[in-house]
């Protein structure tokens, strides 16, 4: 039986590393404003399922959600299929926008529809606690 559909490419799989951490004992990110080897911005799962997982963010828009077509797949029933969009501009500015989700996005503890982001900001989507980091790599 043949299955049709696009074949995966590196561009469709932005996952960079997975280093399991125990968030009760240590945070996944110690210095979010400076992460060695990261070229530009990245999202790191600080707490929640798969703590330590890191995605590099390229210029443009990255979609986050539970849908299989999202750039960053967050496997949690409280995450909408298309939950949020995170945009990194050519000027290195980062911004996140709720994509009409049911449960919203939280930036540094506040529920917001959209927000500018800086390295060190915490983004909560469902049970995922993500930290936006920036490197010099």
Image (cartoon, helix red, strand yellow):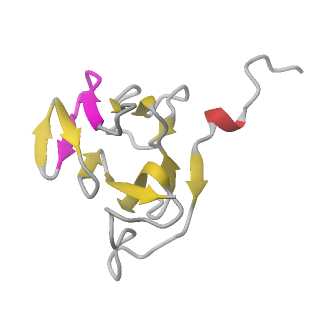
Answer with the quarter of the image where residue 126 lies: top left
Give the magenta part as a residue range. 94-107
Asked if residue 80 lies left or right of residue 18, the reply is left
Residue reaching furthest to the bottom: 25
Q: Residue at 54% across / 25% down in the picture?
A: 69
As drawn, 84 above or below 31: above
As drawn, 86 above or below 30: above
Residue reaching furthest to the top: 4
| Residue 65 spot, x, y in % from top left | 41, 33
Question: Which quarter of the figure is the N terminus placed in?
Answer: top right
| Residue 113 spot, x, y in % from top left | 16, 29
Task: Answer yes or no: is residue 72 visible.
Answer: yes
As drawn, 13 above or below 121: above
Instruction: Tally the marks.
Output: 0
As drawn, 21 above or below 126: below
Answer with the quarter of the image where residue 9 lies: top right
Nearer the observer, 36 or 128: 36
Nearer the observer, 68 or 116: 116
């Amino acid at each position: 039986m043949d299955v049709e559909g696009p074949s995966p490419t590196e561009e469709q799989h932005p996952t960079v590393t997975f280093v399991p951490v125990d968030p009760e004992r240590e945070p996944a990110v110690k210095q979010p404003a400076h992460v060695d080897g990261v070229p530009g911005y990245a999202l790191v799962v600080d707490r929640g399922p798969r703590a330590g997982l890191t995605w590099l963010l390229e210029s443009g828009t990255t979609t986050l959600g539970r849908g299989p077509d999202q750039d960053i797949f967050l496997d949690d029933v409280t995450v909408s299929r298309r939950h949020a969009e995170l945009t990194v501009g050519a000027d290195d500015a980062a911004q996140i926008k709720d994509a009409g989700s049911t449960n919203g996005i939280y930036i540094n503890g506040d529920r917001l529809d959209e927000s500018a982001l800086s390295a060190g900001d915490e983004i909560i989507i469902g049970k995922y606690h993500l930290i936006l980091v920036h490197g010099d790599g």
